[in-house]
Image: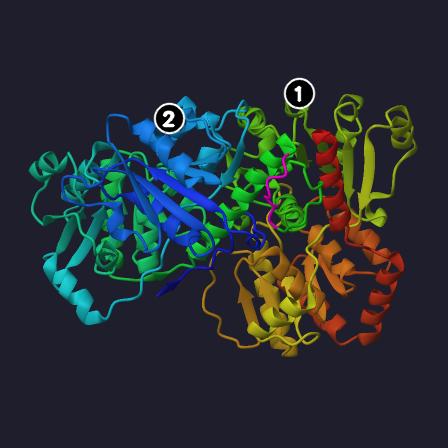
Amino acid sequence: MVPVPPSVESLVPPVAAPATGRRLRVMNVILSRGFAGSERAAVEACAALSQRHDVALVVRSDHRDGSGASLLDELEPGIQVFEVPPRWRTQHRLAEIIDQWRPDIIHTHLRRGTRYVARIKRTARHVSTLHLHLNGPHYLRTDALFCISEWQLATVPSSYHGKTYLVPNSLVSHPRLPPERTRQLRAELGAGDDDFLIGGVGRLVPRKGFDLLLQAFAQAQLPQARLVIVGDGSERGSLQRLAGDGVRFAGFRRDVKDLYQAFDLFVCPSRYEPFGRVIAEALDSGVPVIACESQGPRDIARRYPIDLVPIDDVAKMAAALRRHHAAGRRRIESDLSEFSLEQTAARMEQAYWAVLSAAAAATGSESGFAAAPRVMAAGANAPPARVLFSPVSGPGGAGELMRCLIIARELAQADPTADIRFLVNRHAVFRESVNFPIIDCDASPTRSTPQVLATIESFRPDVMVFDNSGRTSQLRAAKRVGARLVFSSRSPKLRWKAFRIKWMRLLDEHWIVFPTFVTGGLSRVERLKLRIMPHCGVRQFDTLLTPAEPEPRAAWLARQGLQPGAYVVFVPGGRGEATRVAEPAALFIAAAREFVAATGQRTVVLTGRKTIAEQGDARLTLLPRVEPDEVQYLLSEALLVVSNGGSTMIHVLAHGRPIIAIPLAGDQDRRIRRAVRLQIAATAARTPTAIAQTAATLLHDPVRRATMVRCTAELGIANGVGEAVAALLALARRRSG
C-alpha cells in the first residue's frame, strides 16, 4: 500500500451542524436520459436529503436510454417520483407538479430542467447544480448555484444576484471485494493473474477522449497489458474500429464500482471533465490514476495522487502508461471523506436554509423558515461575508500562506456562512493544506496582476486581505468593487510600502505582524501620517496562530507517542526568497540526528516534506507536512524548540517555550539578535554540529531555560487571531451597510 495523507475538508470550508427544526420539502428536477455522472449526483442528493426532509424527484417519462439504463434504477425507496412529457407541454406539466407538491426548494440539475423552472412563476426558491458550466442565461435567474469544482466559481459573473456554494459531487464508498471475486472479474474482462489491466469508464463521446487513450495504449506497446473501456455511447463504433489488440469494450455495466478493483491502473482521458466522479471512484477502490489535465481533475489532483498529462498529448499519455506499467501492481489509500454523502447533505441543507432565510429577510415575511442554528457574527440577516485572501506564495517560504489559512479557519468557525477564497501560486509549498476554494496564479499574486484583477471582478469580495503582497492596481480594483482592504506586513520594506500616501488612501487597516521588540513600534513619521489619514487604522499583532485546544492537542500528541514536556522539536520552516540555506530541512534533520546521538532525547523534526523516508532511530521522529493546528500542538508542549527566525520563532515565544533560533534567511538576523539580547532565545551557527551542540547545552541547563521562559512571559507576547477575525467581520459589516 502507498499511504496518502488524509485530506481534511480539502475542497470546502468547515460546515456548521445541520439545521434542526421543521422538515423542508425539496424537489429535485433532472430531465435527461440514461444514467451517467450527473444522474448519479442527483440520485445521491435525493438519498442524502431524504433522511431529514421530504424529497421528490421529477424526471422525463422516457428516462431510459437506448441501453435501458435509468437513474430510477438507483433511486432509494421513499422518494416520490413525478414524470413529465419529454417534448410537448413539459413546462406546463412541471408547473402543475410544483403547484401540487408545494416545495420549499426546487433543486435543478442540468440545463433543460433549470431553464423550465426559471420560467415558471413560483414561491419556492430555486437552486441549481452546475454539473457542466454556465451554458445558458437561465442559470443566472436562480437563487443559488452549487459549483461542483473550484474552477467553476470563477466563471460566475459579478452580475449574478444569487449565492454561490462549493458543493462537490458525493461519493458512496464501495466495500473491498474478496480476492476470488476480483480474480473472477479480471477473467470476465479477459485478463489473467499476470496481465496488467488498464481501465477506463465513461460515456463513449468525443469529449471523454477515449480515442486518445486507444492511441496511447497502442503507442506504449506494453507487454502483457490489457485495456478495458466500460461504457456506451455514440462513438462506440468508431472507437472499436480504432482499437488494436488487447482492447475490450465492456459496454454499460451496473457493477462498475466492482470493476475498479479489478483494474491495475485507471485512466480518465477526458478533454472536458467538470468534476471527475470516475476519478474519485477509482481512488476509493485503491487503484492508481492517470488523468488528462482538464478542469475537474486538475482541482482533485491538488490533494490526491493523480498523474496528470496534457490534454490530447498521445506521447505523454503513452509515457505515463509505461511509467505505471513499470511500477507494477500497487494499491493506494486515500481519505475521501470530504465527498461523503453526509458532508454533501450538510452543505446542501445549510445552503437551502441560507437561501430561504435571505428570501424571508428580503420580503419581511413571517414564513416560518428558521435559519439553521449557527454563529452569525455579522448579524442575523446579513449576507455571508465574502473574504478574499491574497498571500505571498511560492515554492519556498510559506509563512504568509499559513498565516492567512490560520485566520481563514478561525473566521469559518466564527461565521460558517462566510464565503472564503484564496489566491495562491500554483507552485506554492503547503498549497494542498488550503481547504478553501483556490484561484490559481501562475506566480505569486503580486506578480499575477491579470489573474488577481479578474478574480476581484468576478468574486467582488467584501474584504480583501493582502498579506505581504499586492500592487497599487490590485488595491484600486478591489476598492472599485467596494471591498474593504487589509494589508498585512512583516518586513520593514513592506511596512514602508503600506505607509505610502497612495496606499494609505486605499487601505482600511494595516496589520503589523510581529511583536514590538522586533518591529520597534510606530515611528514619528508613521504616527504623523496616521493623524493626517485617520481612516487607515493600524493594528499591531504579536503573532497569529491557531489556538491549541487541550483535548485535541492531548489526543494528537498521544497518537504520535509523545509525552508533554518530554520531547524536543526541530522546525526548519520553508525556503524563503532570501534563504541562506539551500535545504533547511536537510540541515535540521542532520542536526537532530547529532543531537539525539549525543543526548538520547526524544526528538521530532517537522520536515515540511510531502513524504519521508523510513526512520532508523526510534528516538527520532521525522514528520511530513502537518496541519497548522498540529504544529501548535507540538510547539506548545515541547521541552525546547529549535527553529528558524521567522514566524515560527514568534509562535514558540507565544507558547512560552525555550528556543534556539537559527537565521536561515536574510531578514532573520536582526530579530534573532534582539531576542538573544532580551534573553528569550539562543542561537547557533548554521551547521549541524553547532546546532546540535547548542541544543544539547540548553537541554542540560534548566536554569537558562527557566530564565528564557520568565523573560518571555514579561514581554507578554499574545496571539491576536481572535482580534483579526473580529476585525474582518466588522469590515464585512461595514461593506454590507
At numbered mark 1, what does the secondary structure look like: helix, strand or loop? Answer: helix
Q: Nearer the viewer, residue 268 or 281?
A: 281
Q: Does the magenta stretch mainly form a helix, a strand or a loop?
A: loop
Q: Can residue 222 be seen in this view?
A: no
- Measuring from the top left, give residue 453's x and y in whole percent: 57, 24
Image disc number at residue 169 = none
Q: What element carries label 2?
A: loop
Residue 29 locus on image (x, y percent): 36, 38
Q: Is residue 670 above or below residue 175?
A: above
Q: In which quarter of the image is the N terminus?
A: bottom left
As displayed, is residue 138 above or below residue 244? above
The residue lying at 46 percent from left, 44 percent from top is 167
Q: Using residue 582 as the reference point, say whether residue 109 is left or right of it.
A: left
Specify the color scheme: rainbow
As drawn, is 567 to the left or to the right of 499?
Answer: left
Q: Is residue 219 visible?
A: yes
Q: Tell me the magenta residue range.
A: 365-372
Task: Please tell me whether residue 431 belongs to the stretch shown in magenta.
Answer: no
Q: Nearer the viewer, residue 71 or 248?
A: 71
Q: What residue type is labelled 2?
A: Asn
- Which callout, 1 or 2, points to the residue nearer the camera? 2
Residue at the limit of the structure toward the bottom, as seen here: 600
Asked which quadrant contains residue 4, the reply is bottom left
Say what amino acid the circle numbered 1 marks.
Arg
Which of the 4 image quadrants contains residue 133? top left
In-front residue for pair 363/290: 363
**Which residue is under mark 1?**
480
400 w.r.t. 117: above or below: below
- List the residue tagged with mark 2: 135
Q: Residues within 10 Å of mark 2 (few under 14, many from 20)?
A: few
